[in-house]
Image: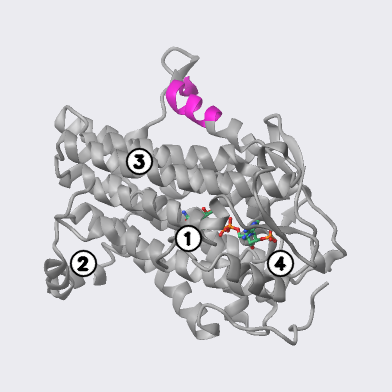
Amino acid sequence: MTKAKPAAFEYEFGGPVGALATTLALPVVIMLLAHWSDAGSVTTTDLLDYTADQRFWDAVQQSAVLCPSCDETALLVKCAAAVIGWFLFQVVLERFLPCELVLGSPIAADGNKRLTYRINGHLAFWVTLLVVQTGWPVWHEASQTYQLEGFPLHYLYDYYTELAFCTILLCVVLTTYLYVDSFVGDKILAEGGNSGNPFYNFFIGRELNPRIYSFDWKEFCELRPGLLAWMLLNAACMKQQYDAQGYVTGSMILLNVFQGVYVWDALYQERAILTTMDITTDGFGFMLVLGDLAWVPFTYSVQARYLVKHDPHLGYPALAVILTIYIFGYLIFRGANGQKDAFRRNPSDPTLSHLTFLQTKRGTKLLTSGWWGMARKINYTGDYIMGLTWCLVCGFDSIVPYYYAIYFMILLIHRSIRDDHMCQTKYGDDWQAYKRLVPYRFVPGIV
Ligand code: NDP
């Protein structure tokens, strides 16, 4: 059990002040983006004028932006019930669908014990789509029978901001519960979440792998309710565009396909999450709870929401170029992540025998050719290229859809620095040797 603050502990994210500021700011940013993606067509200059506009701040003060429908308690209660219902539906799928039991990484703070995870996210993905498509039995008073009723997708668009608000509240409640529960009994604590500062611990998360019996909060939330909600929010925006205009634009179709593939890919490769720093290192605090459950679905769907009212009506040549860039990004992303995952699972895999590697004193091997010989974070580059295409389908009239390109660049640079630091601690001199063999971080020959 990790009780004391480790001697070599170093704050990240700007320490307690940064953690507190981020905790307070992120929910506000989610609500502002929800508002702006609807208001939409603003240039960079207009955006500055817009935020300087008294009407905007009046709306903020009247809670219309930060707490939509705050004066309609009954509506907010229904939205909160929908958010909780959605979460529980995904819990039921995780618990009762057939699964593969997979061991996680050894936990150093717990004598290298390995937790078992239920891997059935890919099946949950398809079952969710099936249920949304076919509906579920609903009791009809008139006929006194159960009848299949389709998923009311349009509610996701109509009450987007209310659902975002209620999801943020759920995140606050869940993080508070996890934080308090981490003091009960002998829990394995995350190194960063055991800093001695409550704000920082609340943000990073105290307990490393909070569980109720075999239900793992962190692994479950990383991939299911948020990612699948994101896909449905996108679909709701596509439906709204069709209902309003009688057709769906090329940008909207491409965006739904691009992001749908991204969600599918994450769930298809579910077991790969078990070796990420989110699972192995960070606690399950506000950073990941809000990130997984609210930030991902409600800010990653900003482009789809923007397109409903502000579609740039790009022509086929532009769409073809964007599609080509996306495929290029996806090939790098999938190629690099798949190669490392296969190598980590079985370094003697005959299909990888052509690759060179560095044998480390720690025991594991670091790839020095193939994708991982080009740049140390080539997988991030592929991911970023894909993300850029999500913005490009929105044209250049507004900066709002480009929030993702800005945010994701900051996230990936910061994450690469964190990982570099962790690898330096893990591998020592070997990491320096690896960096000499693979000197570039993101783009071979450039950066
Ligand atoms: P990585 O997949 O890059 O994994 C980093 C780890 O891989 C290192 O700690 C090290 O761990 C191992 N490793 C590093 N170099 C090598 C090498 N040369 N050979 C073999 N193993 C190596 O990290 P992430 O979990 O951050 O990212 C996974 C994917 O998820 C990325 O594509 C990223 O873009 C994406 N992502 C997307 C987000 C989003 O919001 N859309 C957010 C975060 C990530 P060890 O040696 O211990 O195995």
The first of marks 1 and 4 along the sequence is 1
Let me know if residue 413 appears in the view.
yes
Tell me if residue 167 can be seen.
no
Q: Secondary structure at mark 3?
A: helix
Q: Position of residue 102 (x, y in %)?
A: 76, 42
Question: Dot 4 corresponds to which residue?
Answer: 207
Instruction: Sort mark 1 into few (<14), some (14-19) or many (20+) by Cα contacts within 10 Å.
Output: some
Quadrant position of residue 262: top left
Of the pair 440 and 417, the residue shown nearer to us: 440
Q: CA distance from mark 3 to mark 1?
A: 22 Å
Quadrant for ligand 1 reads bottom right
Q: Earlier in the sequence, mark 3 or mark 2?
A: 2
Q: Amino acid at mark 1?
A: Leu
Q: Quadrant of residue 180?
A: bottom right
Of labels 3 and 4, earlier in sequence is 4
Q: Which residue is mark 3?
A: 234
Q: Which residues are magenta?
A: 126-139
- Hey, what amino acid is under mark 4? Glu
Q: Residue 169, which numbered label?
A: 1
Crowding at label 2, few (<14), some or many (≥20) Cα neighbours within 10 Å? few
Coordinates of residue 311 in the picture (x, y in percent):
17, 43
Q: Are marks 3 and 1 in contact (CB under 8 Å)?
A: no
**Mark 4 to mark 2: distance in Å?**
39 Å
Residue type marked 3: Asn
Name the amino acid, label 2.
Ala
Q: Is mark 2 within 8 Å of ligand 1?
A: no
Q: Which mark is residue 59?
A: 2
